[in-house]
Structure formats: structure tokens, C-alpha cells
Amino acid sequence: MDKTIGIFGGGQLGRMMAQAALPLNIQCTFFEAQQDCPAAALGHVFSSQAEHGLSAFIQSADVFSLEFENTPLEDVDALSQTKSIYPPRQALAIAQNRLSEKTLFNQLDIPVAPFKAVDSLDSLKQAVSELGLPIVLKTATGGYDGKGQFVLRQADQIEQAWAELGPAQSLIAESFVTFSREVSIIAVRGQNGEVKTWPLAENHHHHGILSHSIVPAPNSIDLQPVAQDYITRLLNHLNYVGVLTLELFVTEQGLFANEMAPRVHNSGHWSIEGAVCSQFENHIRAVAGLPLGSTDVIRPTVMVNIIGQHPKSEDVLALNGAHLHLYNKTEREGRKLGHITLMPVNSEDLVGLCRQLAQILPEPLALKADMTL
Ligand code: AMP
């Protein structure tokens, strides 16, 4: 092996990074609490629970990355004394706090919904009077997939919202954005500053969890350069290396940024088959200091998450143009177990293929049979 990359986290994102790394003669190691994590089949897992787990992990690799944005900054600091980590610490620190994130978006002239910091019942009342209703109240740290959120529609909910989210933590109150769809842009920046961007993905959620992504996002020719400009501002400002994701709302006033993820992203899984070079391979290339690959799309693609229950593999693979990715996880409600990439030879067949897939996915159905492209 030419190089070893140590990855904080050993979930499916780490697994798919390591799958992309192997053909380049790059080995991955992982730092993770669960020994039987999805990445375990691909490289050694150093236990984050063991007494000297972190120092053994730091010794195990030449350079580091992460698949989990809540990677503790103390761990990053411990390794930074002797080794490098990409993305940079600053990007991680900002992405861990919604207030810092939204402040950075403002600073870089990336549109965001008006927001206010909230740390007391009085400041929540003040935010409601300044921003108006409805507002979305979120924990500043730790929330994901819509958890740690309260949509405040009426003034008589203020106390309830504060009681549910407030007392222990810092919050952000954001104006409610009326959007027609949610999209994400994923880009990669190399160690030489080169930036490459994949096309926008249109993302559909079910119970707060990504259900499927359509790429390129339909009717997005005008949005693509705008989103590309926003993410490039972030990448250059942060002197970023690796893959960055920016989630955006499409509104009548244009794109509004919601949040960034300093890592490969579920809405980019389509790129394994659908792009010349996937988000995983380009992330590994960037972290290893190698030239970046093309982010061009091969054919329009739909990525469907497998959530909670596995479909029969033979049913999925009987569909012409379906690729199955399983993460070696056990079934549990709301858990991401794998994904399916639909990429028929003729892109006109994509809607039909989606409908066929919707018939064979077990309940709860992640993909609505009436989906439109
Ligand atoms: P987040 O945890 O910030 O990704 O939010 C989860 C979901 O809540 C988003 O995908 C949106 O559907 C919705 N959401 C978050 N923020 C807002 C907002 N300011 N206005 C309207 N909907 C929002």
C-alpha cells in the first residue's frame, strides 16, 4: 500500500471511502466505537472506547479525514500536533455549530433565512418579535435529520418550544423558508486549490430522512452556476481540502443555504456509478494529494435509500440498470441500511424503473410511486 488514511468514524461513508481508496493502493483505518461497524470489512477499526485507542489510531495512518462532522475537536487537535487532517479543523468547528455556520454564510454573501441566537426565554420572545412567525427553532449543535427542531407557528407555543429545546443548550431561531424543493451541491477541492463540482441533486425526504435524490436536479440549469459559486466561496475561504456539501432551499427569491456538511454526503452516493469520478474517490484523491477526477455525469441517475428494512437483493438486481449497495447493518426502523442507484441505459426509462423499484421496496416505502422527474 502506498499510503494509509485514518478516518474518524466507521459507518457507511467510511466504508465507501475505503472502497474507493483500495484501487489506488490506499488503505484506510477507522476510529469508531462499534467494532462491527460497516467499515470494518475494509480496514482495521481502532476503538474510540479503548484507553489508548486514539494514540494507536494516530500512529496507524499518514494523513487523516472524517466521515462524521461531530468528530470531537480535541481528537483533531491531538493528531494535528504530528499529522494533517482534511478537511481543516476550522471547517469542522464551523459546521458543528449552526450559528457559526449561518454567520459564515452571511459573511460570504451566501443568502440564508434571517436568524437570531437564542439562549433564554426572553431572547426567544425577542427573536419572535424581530423575525415574525413562523420560525424554526433548532439546537445550535448536535441536531441532524430534523432532530432537535421545533417549528413555532403561534405565539402561544413559545413557552412549549423553549421547554422542549431550550434550557440546556444554545439555540438558533430561523425564519421559516417557503421553498419549492431542496437541493444540494457537492464539490471537492484539492491540495493545490483546484475545485470541481458535481451537478445539483434534488433531494426528497420521508420522516426527516433522505429518501431519494435525482441527479441532475430537474430544471436547475440556472441554479447550478449560483450554487457552484456559493460552494466555491466556502471552499476557498476555508482553504478546504476534500469534499464539501451545501444543502440549499429553492425559493422564489433564489437559493437559500440551509447547512453545510464537511464530508461526503448521502445525496452524492449516485456518483459512484453516475459520475466519471465519485465523491468518495475524489475525496480520497484530495486527502492523498492526488489529481482530482472529472465530476461529469455519465447519465441521469436516481439514488434511493434503503431505510429500516432490506428489500430482496434478487428483486433489486433483476431490474435492468439498478446497482445495489448494502452497508452490512441490521434492520432497525429509520436506519439507513443501503442504497440503490438507478441508471438505465436510456434515460427515458428512468421514471419507469423508479416505479418498478417502488413496487419491490418493503414498507415503509421510501420512494413514492408517483414520483416525477
Ligand atoms: P436541518 O436539520 O437544518 O437540515 O433541517 C431539516 C429539515 O427541516 C430541512 O431539510 C427542511 O426540510 C426543514 N427546515 C430546516 N430549516 C428550515 C427553515 N428555516 N425553513 C423551513 N424549513 C426548514
Image: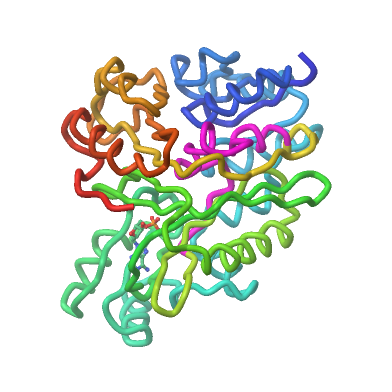
Quadrant that contains the N terminus: top right
Residue with the most extreme bottom position = 129
Residue 192 relative to residue 367: left or right:
right
Q: Is residue 156 above or below residue 180?
A: below
Question: Residue at the spot x=36%, y=83% of the render?
Answer: 131
Image coords of residue 195 (percent x, y): 72, 52
Magenta residues span 258-285
Question: Residue at the spot x=44%, y=74% of the render?
Answer: 113
Q: Quadrant of ligand 1?
A: bottom left
Question: Residue at the spot x=62%, y=29% of the render?
Answer: 7
Could you say which is closer to the camera, residue 284 or residue 316?
Answer: 316
Image coords of residue 128 (percent x, y): 32, 81
Q: Is residue 174 above or below residue 187?
A: below
Image coords of residue 28 (percent x, y): 65, 21
Q: How is the image coloured?
A: rainbow
Q: Is residue 232 above or below residue 189?
A: below
Q: Is residue 275 magenta?
A: yes
Question: Residue at the spot x=49%, y=59% of the render?
Answer: 259
Choose top left, top right, bottom left or bottom right for residue 58.
top right
Residue 204 relative to residue 17: left or right:
left
